């Protein structure tokens, strides 16, 4: 089986790791697979080195970028030519831009070829709120609705919450097209995931970390405002890089955070999770955040905004606090709720038993449910089952 997989760019984040792990796993299972990617723009870290370390060499199409552009026509034409050469049995697209370009090229391929590959699209998140203006969002949503009808056999989402949002709220696709495939990751024998639980480490103030690219959708402003509320109770570290960094460093100074917040840049997971006691996630929109899964596997408790697949990862509500919910595997607050998020962090800071219990449950859950081996098996099953209704 030949599988052509397309992603807009290999920038730092969950989608890039996801496609590399899948490419490696598919090769081991005897698939002939080709990963196609665009270029990473200035200000974002490139994960080509991560791909190389896993034996994956992507084919780069320089005209494929994140933003809408006249060059998209060139990208579609190049993808169409590639399909004619590679003759895929499955075309699997990841992220919005690659999903649009790949499936539009696929329409041309179907019109000019007798082959009828299965087209699969994975929503790692979505761009239907929190990213663009209302008009541009409408354009993206219209394109997604059209492509779901015209050239998509299966739509993969990472969580049930994401399926409800994309299909029921935004009316993309038919119910029978959707399949929930939770994110998988490299867990063992990674050195980050064999350390003692954070509750058992050292004395002194605990460290709250945030992990992710420095982009508006991640809402690091909220993290810094929470840090300002709790400056006398904990230390704070920002892992990741991006165009927002200079502005965020200025904001930290304006909030008087001084040496209470460290901007540590992009680091390997083996450095990140042993160095923090609590992970904070402040995003306005998410699919299934890899940072939360990594923290859970490392036994680091999580406080997050209740967006996208976060609520599925952290489980049902077990108790309600003042502006936050204590869940089976973490604490959530409403998006952009500074007071609620600070309250959730403070609850962890003052309750070592709660931290230890959630850490243990989270680690067990991640190892059982989110291995990359399970991810590969689920995706291979999607490929082999095909669409419910071939067009």
Image (cartoon, rainbow, N blue to C red):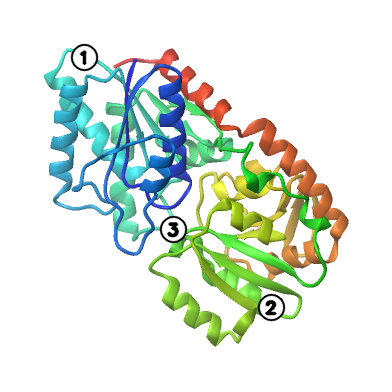
Q: Residue at x 47, y 34 (%)?
A: 21
Mark 1, other Cα within 10 Å: few <14 / some 14–19 / many ≥20 = few
Asked if residue 307 shows in the view, the reply is no
Quadrant where the C terminus sits is top left
Query: Looking at the rendering, which quadrant does residue 273 occupy?
Result: bottom right
* Residue 201 relative to residue 154: left or right: right
The residue that disc 1 covers is 115
- Is residue 377 depicted above or below 313 in this figure? above
Residue 42 can be seen in this image = yes
Determine which residue is flagged by label 3: 130
Which residue corresponds to the image point at 60% horizontal and 57% vertical from the top-left?
Answer: 271
Which numbered disc, 2 or 1, marks the residue that appears first in the sequence? 1
Label 2 crowding class (10 Å Cα cut-off): few <14, some 14-19, many 20+?
Answer: some
Q: Nearer the viewer, residue 379 or 1?
A: 1
User: Residue 310 at x, y = what percent?
Assistant: 61, 47
Mark closer to the chain start, 2 or 3 = 3
Secondary structure at badge 2 equals helix
Label at residue 383: none
**Residue 145, image x, y percentages:** 33, 36
Q: Secondary structure at mark 1?
A: loop
In this figure, which residue is indicated by the disc labeled 2?
A: 229
The mark lying in front, picked from 2 and 3, is: 2
Q: CA distance from mark 2 to mark 1?
A: 60 Å
């Amino acid at each position: 089986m030949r599988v052509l997989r397309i992603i807009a760019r290999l920038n730092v984040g969950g989608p890039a790791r996801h496609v590399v792990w899948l490419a490696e796993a598919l090769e081991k299972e005897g698939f002939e697979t080709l990963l196609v990617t665009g270029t990473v723009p200035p200000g974002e870290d490139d994960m080509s080195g991560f791909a190389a370390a896993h034996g994956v060499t992507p084919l780069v199409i320089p005209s494929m970028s994140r933003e809408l552009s006249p060059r998209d026509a060139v990208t579609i034409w190049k993808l169409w030519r590639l399909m004619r050469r590679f003759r895929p049995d499955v075309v699997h697209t990841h992220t919005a831009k690659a999903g649009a370009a790949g499936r539009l090229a696929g329409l041309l391929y179907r019109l000019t070829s007798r082959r009828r590959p299965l087209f699969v699209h994975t929503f790692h998140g979505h761009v239907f709120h929190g990213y663009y203006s209302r008009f541009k969002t409408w354009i993206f949503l219209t394109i997604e609705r059209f492509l779901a009808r015209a050239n998509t056999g299966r739509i993969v989402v990472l969580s049930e919450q994401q399926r409800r949002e994309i299909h029921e709220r935004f009316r993309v696709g038919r119910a029978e097209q959707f399949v929930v495939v939770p994110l998988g990751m490299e867990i063992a024998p990674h050195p980050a995931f064999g350390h003692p639980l954070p509750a058992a480490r050292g004395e002194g103030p605990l460290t709250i970390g945030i992990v992710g690219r420095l982009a508006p959708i991640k809402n690091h402003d909220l993290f810094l405002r929470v840090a300002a509320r709790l400056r006398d109770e904990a230390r704070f570290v920002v892992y990741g890089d991006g165009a927002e960094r200079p502005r965020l460093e200025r904001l930290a100074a304006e909030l008087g955070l001084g040496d209470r917040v460290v901007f540590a840049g992009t680091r390997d997971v083996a450095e990140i999770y042993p160095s923090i006691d609590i992970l904070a996630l402040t995003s306005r929109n998410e699919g299934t955040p890899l940072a939360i899964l990594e923290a859970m596997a490392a036994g680091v408790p999580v406080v997050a905004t209740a967006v996208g697949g976060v609520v599925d990862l952290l489980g049902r509500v077990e108790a309600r606090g003042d502006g936050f919910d204590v869940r089976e595997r973490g604490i959530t607050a409403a998006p952009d709720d500074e007071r609620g998020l600070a309250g959730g962090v403070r609850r962890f800071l003052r309750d070592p038993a709660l931290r230890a219990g959630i850490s243990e449950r989270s680690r067990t859950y991640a190892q059982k449910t989110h291995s990359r081996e399970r991810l590969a098996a689920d995706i291979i099953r999607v490929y082999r089952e095909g669409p419910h209704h071939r067009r």
